[in-house]
Image (cartoon, rainbow, N blue to C red):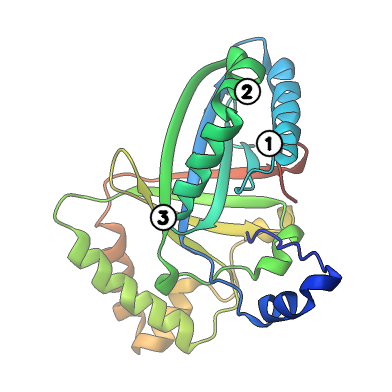
Amino acid sequence: MLALALVFVLLPGMAAVAADKAMPKAAPGNIADRWVLWPKAGQEKEFEAAVKQHAAWRKNAGEPFTWVTYQPIVGTDLTYYVIRSDDHQWKDFDAEEAWETKAKANDAYEQQVGVHVARVEHFFEETDAEHSQWIDSKNIKDYKYFGVYSRRLKGGSRGEMAAALAKIQKGITDEKWPYHYRLAWLIGGADRLRIVIPMKSYADMADPDPPLRKVLAKSLGSEESADATLKQFSSSFEDYDYTVYAIRPDLSTQR
């Protein structure tokens, strides 16, 4: 999601402002910052209240990043929260770090939120834009749920996976498959691919029509070729996990 740029028009600087307006907007980056927090048992309400307080503090303190919070609604562990900031270039993290130091953001976090947290995990995530068909930033607010497939890549299987993925993406592009999805690689821990499917409602959780297998069969010329390609892709991974997250605007600094 893209941060909104605020333009202040002052009469003495009209020419400079006009020039700034004419400049093209910087393209979004493909790096996300992703934090996973588990509240202490029995302190879930206090944790949420603290996150709301801290989100307001960060906005008022002029933080460069904006954050969106998600909560799992299916799976074996529903006790954690994912807080992430998207669309960054690596250099953006230097500006964020400088702001954190100046604003003493880590101290504020520990005082407001950290006292209610039992466990923390931190990752970066790099979107594979070439093999994604994501939502336009102006429409992201229409989506309430996000299905996330998580797969751990087998050692030495990246080439096989990439070859299959190229065929799948070509089929999706050739047949103009209308569904949105994002592929991203987790940075930190295992070499894991995450496939994210945005959904506006529970109705969107139904299987796609036409299914991917049919789309790929048309592109590759046969169902056998489609099955072989899908098997080549799936067999490149060691495990499989799926979770649906609901967005929590009330615990976010954006949306």
Q: Secondary structure at mark 2?
A: helix
Q: Nearer the viewer, residue 23 or 137?
A: 23
Residue 210 horizontal/vertical position (percent): 56, 76
From where the camera sits, is residue 96 visible?
yes
Displayed quadrant of residue 58: top right
Residue at 76 percent of width and 22 percent of height? 49
Displayed quadrant of residue 62: top right
Quadrant in which the N terminus is drawn? bottom right
Q: Nearer the viewer, residue 12 or 67?
A: 12
Q: Secondary structure at mark 3?
A: loop
Image vertical order of residue 150 relative to residue 43, above or below: below
Per the model, the C-alpha gap separating discs 2 and 1 is 9 Å
**Residue ranking furthest to the front:** 12
Image vertical order of residue 4 relative to residue 16, above or below: above
From where the camera sits, is residue 227 visible?
no
Number of other residues with Cα within 10 Å of mark 3, as a class: few under 14, some 14 to 19, many 20 or more: few
Q: Secondary structure at mark 1?
A: helix
| Mark sitting on residue 108 | 2
- Identify the mark nearer the N-term, 2 or 1: 1
Amino acid type, residue under disc 3 in the picture: Trp
- Identify the mark nearer the N-term, 1 or 3: 1
Residue 154 horizontal/vertical position (percent): 21, 50
Side of 50 where 65 appears, left or right: left
- Identify the mark nearer the N-term, 3 or 2: 3
Marks 2 and 1 close (CB-CB < 8 Å) = yes
Side of 89 where 157 appears, left or right: left
Q: Which residue is mark 3?
A: 90
Image vertical order of residue 9 relative to residue 156, above or below: below
Per the model, the C-alpha gap separating discs 1 and 3 is 21 Å
Q: Which residue is mark 1?
A: 58
Per the model, the C-alpha gap separating discs 3 and 2 is 24 Å
Residue 192 horizontal/vertical position (percent): 33, 48
